[in-house]
Structure formats: C-alpha cells, structure tokens
Amino acid sequence: MRYASHLAIAALTMSASLIASAYAADPIKVGVTVTQSPPGSVVQGTQVKDGLEVAAKMLNDQGGVLGRPIELVVEDTQGLPEKARAAVEKLITRDKVVGIVGEHQSSNVLAGMEVAHRYHIPYINTNGWADAIREKGYPEVFNPNNYNRRVAMAAAETIKKLGAKKVVSFAENTDYGIGLAKGIGEQLKAVAPEVSYRFDTLDRAAKDYLPAILPLRSDPPDVVVDVMLPPAAYIMMNQVYEQGVAPTAKTWFYDASGLADYPDFWQNIKEAGKDLLVFGLYHPKMKAPELAKTVGDAYTKKTGAQPNRLLFQAADSLLVLADAIKRANSTDPDALVKALEATKYTGTRGEITFSSEPGYKYHQWLDIPYVTFQVTEIGQKVADSPLVEQPGQPLDPSKLARP
C-alpha cells in the first residue's frame, strides 16, 4: 500500500509538472496587420513581414519571452483602412493577441489604432509617418519608426543647402502624402522663407499625372519633391522624367519617400532614377549597432535580398514589444503600456526611447537616424550610391553630381 501511495504521488507530481510545462510553453500571440495583396504595396508588406519573422525566430531561438515562444498571427489588410480596422478587431477579440505590430501605411495605422485604443491593447506603429497618429495622444500607440515632421525638417534643410528658390511637391491624396507635403512647406517657412513652395495632390489610383506635370516644362522649379508611394510614385516619376522636367541641370529630383531601396525600384524606374536625391532611413555605409548586422545577415539568409530600412523598422517593432513584456514580466495591457513608456532599448538603428511630450512627439522615438544619398547610375545598388549626408551631419553639396 505504501509503494502504491508513492506511485500515485509521483504520478500526480509528474502530471502537475507536465501541465505547468505545457502552460509555460503556450505561445505569446502578437498580431500583424500587413499588406499581402493589392491594391496596397505588397513589396512593402513583404519586407515588413520578413523582418518580423526574422525577429521572432531570433527571440524564439533564444528561448522565447518569459519562457514562451512568440507566435505571429498575420492578417492581410490589402492596404485598405477598413480592412485594417477589421483585422485588428479580429486579432484582439478572436486570436487574443497581446499587441499589434507591422502596419506600414499611415491611413491603415489611423484606422487600426482606433480599435487597439478601444480595447486598450498595445499598438506598435511600424511605418505610419503621419503626425496625426501621435497627435491623437493614445496611450496604447508607440512609434519606433519615422515620422512626417522628421522628413519635413530633413527635406527643408536639403532644399536650403541646394540654394533652391522654387520648389514643387507631388503628394499622394492620403494622410501621409498631404501631411508631409504641408509639413515641408511649414519647415521651409522656418528655415528658408525666401523659397517659393507649393504642392499638387495626386490621386494614388490614377495612371496619368500629365495635367500636373506639363505646366512645369515651361516654368521648371529648382526642385521637384516626391511625396508618393508605389505604384503611383513610379508612374509619376517616370512621367516627370519623360517630360524633361527632372532630374535636369536646372531641376533636382528629391525623393522624400525613400524609394530607392525598394526591391522593385529598378524594375519600374530606369533613366528616371539616375541623379535622384534620396531621403534614406538606411544605408549600408551609415553607422549602426551590432544588432543590425545580425538581423541583416538573418534577413539575407532567409530571403536572398539585401537589408533595407523596413526590415529594421519591423524587427525593432517586435523587439521593443518583447523587451517590454520581459521587463513587465507580464502580458497585461496596463503593465505593457507602462513598460513601453519606460523603454530604453538598443535596437537595430540605435537606442530607442519614447517621448511623453504631447502633439507629434507623443510616444515617438524622436532621434530616428536618417541619411541623404544620391543615385548616380542606372540600376545602382544603395550600397554603391554616394552618401552625401551622414546621420546627425549637415548635407555636403560639394559631394553632389549635377544631372
């Protein structure tokens, strides 16, 4: 009887241990809203998804978070705000995710974060630039990515350094496009009030932008600024070049959307890409933490492609959330929000912290590193392009090649 009792106790102990192990191994589900089919930018969506998968694998290879694996639950938004809203609702209510990451279009972020705010679930904005995202002041929304005001300041400083007097922007009809185009105008008033500036809003679903472009043939500006995303941006850029407007010896073409590192850039842009000035969030020649090399190598091994800025933004989005879960020792929303506000994490691009100032700075990593580079040859890889502005340094016009 004593022997049987010991066996029973051992069996119960083993059973309890197995149950505890199984519970500890339950995955931490993280929701991903990302474009995987048209009409949104599938290329961007794929880069973000790959970056998140690379980061998740790294975390899981190290034992996961709190002893539990990270599981990404992916929903395709097609780049449509109504799809993003529905995706976040489904991820929170049905899949029981602890946070949302991955969105890469401002209008989708603005739609999806409303749902996250309603359910009080952390929302890590991977690539929505619109200042309206932060101006909402939602405590659940954190922004370790770029923001329109940062680009506007960079663009205005570049235009000033170029000595331009007349500037025209072509902006897509979205929160991102219109917001950034207005922001560039505001920053120019502050740093170069002598510059004449205007922007034309173009329909991102259109195919013909000649009515806006043709008047520039007889009255060319000193700088044309792209504030559009593919595929519309590619159509506009080609038409601007074909009409002899930019880039020319008279007119610079400045890409404020940073498109030259997109994998499909040279498939869609040929001669129009030569001599382009590019606002960049990544360049192989810029200084970066060691983690960037680790993540970049893993990405190349997975995809065969070279690292890009969306890879690093996506990886940092998940890594920042994982870091908050570790420090909070919990997936409770209140604990996570508090931990995210106290973030001081060295990611792939530098030390990430979040501002508590209201307005466009709220829950934003303010010191996003950026560069300016020039594409000097057709088909040129970003790594081979001249870097004319390092992070934290002024642009050097003497390094630029005139078209």
Image: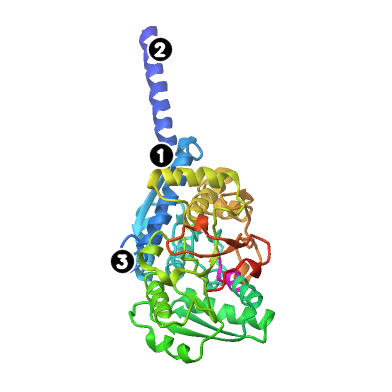
How many residues crowd around disc 2 within 10 Å: few (fewer than 14), some, or many (20 or more)? few
Are the residues at dot 2 and dot 1 in contact (C-beta closer than 8 Å)?
no
Q: Could you tell me the amino acid type at mark 2?
A: His
Q: Distance of mark 3 from mark 2, alpha carbons?
A: 64 Å
Tell me how far mark 3 sits from mark 1, CA to CA: 34 Å
Classed neighbour count for the residue bearing mark 3: other residues with Cα under 10 Å, few (<14), some (14–19), many (≥20): few
Magenta stretch: give its range: 146-152
Query: Percent x, y for residue 49?
Result: 40, 53
Circles 3, 2 touching at the beta carbon (< 8 Å): no
> Residue 241 location, x and y as percent?
42, 78
Report the side of 58 relative to 158 (left or right).
left
- Identify the residue at image location x=67%, y=61%: 392
Q: Is residue 352 above or below residue 400?
A: above
Identify the element where label 3 is drawn: loop
Q: Could you classify mark 1 by the number of other residues whose Cα lies within 10 Å: few (under 14), some (14-19), or many (20 or more)?
A: few
Q: Which mark is residue 38?
A: 3
Q: Report the residue marked by disc 2.
A: 6
Mark closer to the chain start, 3 or 2: 2
Mark nearer the viewer, 3 or 2: 3
Residue at 68% x, 79% y is: 191
Percent of width and height locating residue 122: 50, 57
Q: Residue 26's mark? A: 1
